[in-house]
Amino acid sequence: MSHTNFSHKLKPFIADGGKSGSLQSPEPVPAYNGPLSDWQIVTIISDTDYLELNYNDGGYRRIRKSKCSCGQAVLIELDSKETCRRDKLRIFYPDLTDTGWCVFRCKRCGQPIGDTCKDAAYDKAENDE
């Protein structure tokens, strides 16, 4: 089985540490008909952050691993288009990866995830409005 290397498409994003903002592929990604799920990790940025590629549409997303103060693991999609939060964070659980929802309360302790997970905290300016 051969795999296509998409690293050449990530270089502009990785070169500036992800500060360029856009996580979308600058060019279409060739169709892949192999036995992979939609999202696959293509670049590990740090111990907590990584970049995923959607093999169906060529889109990228940056994910941060985090957890609630009770220990429940959560993933945070940065700059998400599928969230109701103005800071564009989409919080979800590692075992439930469908993109149609965002966590508000922790499923383990029931507390608001914005209060119990520092990476998911609401921006102060957003709270003041």
Image: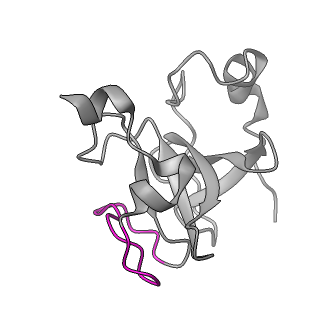
Q: In the picture, which quadrant includes the N terminus? A: bottom right
Q: Residue furthest left?
A: 129
Residue 109 can be seen in this image? yes
Q: In the picture, which quadrant includes the C terminus? A: top left
Residue 120 vs 107, above or below: the answer is above
Residues 104 and 51: in front is 104
Residue ID at (63%, 75%): 71
Question: Could you say where residue 56 lies in the image, as x and y percent from the top left?
Answer: 47, 53
Q: Residue furthest front?
A: 128
Residues 11 and 108: in front is 108
Question: Could you say where residue 111 lies in the image, as x and y percent from the top left?
Answer: 38, 72
Residue ID at (80%, 42%): 46
Question: Could you say where residue 65 lies in the image, as x and y percent from the top left?
Answer: 65, 57
Residue ID at (70%, 46%): 50
62 relative to 16 in the view: left or right: left
108 relative to 101 in the view: left or right: right
Residue 39 vs 125, above or below: the answer is below
- The secondary structure making up most of the magenta span is loop
Bounds of the magenta segment:
96-111
Quarter of the image where one finds residue 66: bottom right
Residue 51 within the magenta-colored segment of the rendering: no
